[in-house]
Image (cartoon, rainbow, N blue to C red):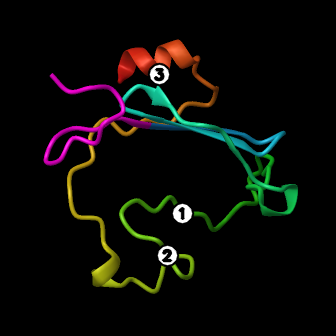
Amino acid sequence: MVKEGIFIHRGWNHICWTYFGDSGTNHIFFNGNKLPPVTFPSENSFPSVPGSKDVHSSALILGQEQDILRGAFDKKQLFQGNLSQFNIWDEILSDSAIQEMA
């Protein structure tokens, strides 16, 4: 049996990230354990982008940090592994809901 919060080498690990745009507070859950919150100063927070039909360029990149939007791919930086059950919610899940999923 694996203890909660321990990285499972060559096994499944559950990671959940929540972000509160109003305060800039981030929470990471790792295999059911909630890590201490991290708050970024407002000048470094993710911007709040209102919905619009005028948004023409955006991207969700999984597997590699991008140096420029849709470019600068470096095969030495790629993610090697499996990603399963990737979900995005439009609301903050409760701590207990996240821990149940883990």
The amino acid marked with disc number 1 is Ala
Q: Quadrant location of the C terminus?
A: top left
Q: What stretch of residues is rendered in magenta?
A: 1-15
Q: Earlier in the sequence, mark 1 or mark 2?
A: 1
Identify the image quadrant of residue 19: top right
Instruction: Between residue 24 and residue 48, name the one nearer to us.
Output: 24
> Residue 92: x and y, percent?
63, 26
Mark 2 surroundings: few (<14), some (14-19) or many (≥20) residues within 10 A: some
Instruction: Between residue 45 and residue 6, name the one nearer to us.
Output: 6
- Horizontally, is 80 left or right of 33 in the view? left
> Residue 68: x and y, percent?
56, 81
Figure check: 94 above or below 90: above
Q: Does the magenta segment cover residue 58? A: no
Residue at x-position 47% and y-position 83%: 71
Mark 3 surroundings: few (<14), some (14-19) or many (≥20) residues within 10 A: many
Q: Which residue is mark 2?
A: 66
**Tag 1 and tag 2, C-beta contact below 8 Å:** yes
Classify mark 3: helix, strand or loop.
helix
The amino acid marked with disc number 2 is Gln
Residue at x-position 71% and y-position 60%: 55
Q: Earlier in the sequence, mark 3 or mark 2?
A: 2
Q: Which residue is mark 1?
A: 59
Q: CA distance from mark 1 to mark 3?
A: 26 Å
Which dot marks residue 98? 3
Classify mark 2: helix, strand or loop.
loop
Q: Main secondary structure of the magenta part?
A: loop
